[in-house]
Amino acid sequence: MPHAAVDLPLLSTLVVGLGLALLLGYVAQRLRFPPLVGYILAGILAGPATPGFVADPGVVHQFAEIGVMLLLFGVGLHFSPKDLLAARYVVVPGALAQMALTTATGFALALWWGWPAGAALALGLCLSVASTVVLLKALESRGETGSPLGRITMGWLVVEDFAAIFVLVLLPAFSNRAASGGAVVGVLRALGLTAGFVVLMLAGGRKLFPAVLWRVARTGSRELFTLCVVVVAVGIAYGAGRIFGVSFALGAFLSGMVLRESDFSHRAAERVLPLQDAFSVLFFVSLGMVFHPSVLLHRPLQVLELSVVVVAGKLIWGTAAMLARAQPLSSALAMGAGIAQIGEFSFILAGSAIALGILPPEAMDLVLSSAIVSICLHAQLSRAVPSAVAWLRKHVRPGLLERAGDPLSTLPQSTPLQYLTGQVVLVGYAGLGAKLAESLLRRAIPFVVVDESSSSVEALRKRGIPAVRGDASDPGVLVQAHIMRAGMLLVTTSDPVRDASMILTARTLNPPVEIVFHAEGDEDAQRLRGEGCAVFLTQDVQAEAMGAHVAARFGK
């Protein structure tokens, strides 16, 4: 069949697109770049901008949409409204402040280029939204989705995504093609439909979807259960767009969030993850396919200036917004580095603005080029955070960066003496830390918790458990936990740079203190044992075994 490739554009596009993505992703990984850089290059090679095979962009784009749906569905499955409410004083003002500052910076830059005010505002908004795909992949690769910072980051992304959806609804009001009265009616109608969809999902979906999954699960068929999960994720997202005019992303996210309340959430997440990974690769391939590399030759200064706004600007504004909410410097810099990129919602906003005549057509290539630059630099920025924190704390007076006087950063003066002498300093309360805390309580061993989550520290103090909010790699935080007189430093997190700082501080202020670590693997365990620490491996021990070790040390 000589024309098989022409007659089967779907098959040829998938084979070539995924094959190039595999090859170039592997090369990028070997060169210590994130694999998604290779996926973007695969899209450029398979796109119309380069000679040779040209994949069907419509096919790739539709598969990319499925990838975004499944990804946001997975975010919803892991997202807890309680976590967002607990961190609302950080993520809501922080995310909105960052978006406003980035929008203002992009607006000023576009005005300087000579663009009209409407186009400048739209461009600034495109730059203000970080890619959920990129940042969630980074959190998953580091195993940080369940950490305090991971929960804050996911809440931050949700706030940004909701704000972007709201902007999409309001875009017609800025269009020169819409009459003022018609634009207002259209905005009100869109807002009403969005609100109706959200209410319907939260009210009806909470009972309907778990009931459907239960009936399918009773058949005992894994294939049917997987199919049901995919239909729920993609079907609701599609219906949200076609019936209510809501974005596919919002529909998928809400369906996942509703299913999280059921007993099937973990099983559903396991089933959808492989499909999510495969289809999200096509998102980056589609990004490369619509990119025209000629923009780098024709508008190099504009690409550079936009990239600076996205990378440097969002790094600064995101860090500043976190510091303004009394977050530790390490968390603030990690957040700033994490959101210093743009992605899927930026392209959706840019495409809608171009269709409405608000942005000029060349704006898409500018947004895409800055997205590619920022995504390529994302991993390097994140890896540089620990070193940057150490340098800043060494060369900059801490009070200039981190807010002084935070009531959660010091132990209350009423803390009983038993918690200040011979106590356990427990670093990290999420997951294993919470189990260890309960074990210590049962054994009546006094301890002080050090955690970066304000909500966790507040909850512990309400229970009468002494707790300090802050980064335990900061000597000042361990001092507040009274490490000088502690009987043990018990660490449930693992990070080479932070570990070294904690060990040095503890040994300097309290040479005989016993240091116990929870390690993720043999390499970490060997490194920590070389420092004279007791180490428990994830695969070897649970919370009770570590608790028993502490109990033996304290004679309980």
Image (cartoon, rainbow, N blue to C red):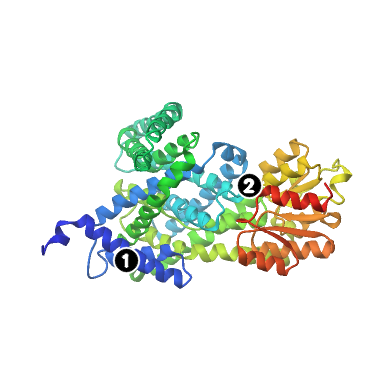
Q: In this view, does 199 lie above or below 289?
A: above
For label 2, the crowd category at 10 Å Cα-Cα, with few meaning under 14, some 14 to 19 and many 20 or more, is: few
Q: Going 53% across and 59% down the picture, which residue do you hit?
A: 313
Q: Are marks 2 and 1 in contact (CB under 8 Å)?
A: no
The amino acid marked with disc number 2 is: Gly
Residue wearing tag 2: 431
C-alpha span from label 2 to label 1: 39 Å
- Residue 7, how many percent across, how many down? 14, 57
> Does label 2 or label 1 sit earlier along the sequence?
1
Q: Taking the image as drawn, is residue 498 in sight?
A: yes
Residue wearing tag 1: 20
Q: Which of marks 2 and 1 is in front?
A: 2
- Residue 403, how many percent across, how many down? 71, 51
How many marks overall? Answer: 2
Q: What element carries label 2?
A: loop
- Residue 119, how many percent across, how many down? 38, 51
Could you say which disc has been placed on residue 65 in the image? none
Given residues 77 and 469, the one toward you in this image is: 77
Q: Going 33% across and 52% down the picture, which residue do you hit?
A: 64
Looking at this rendering, what residue extends furthest in the bottom direction?
Answer: 31
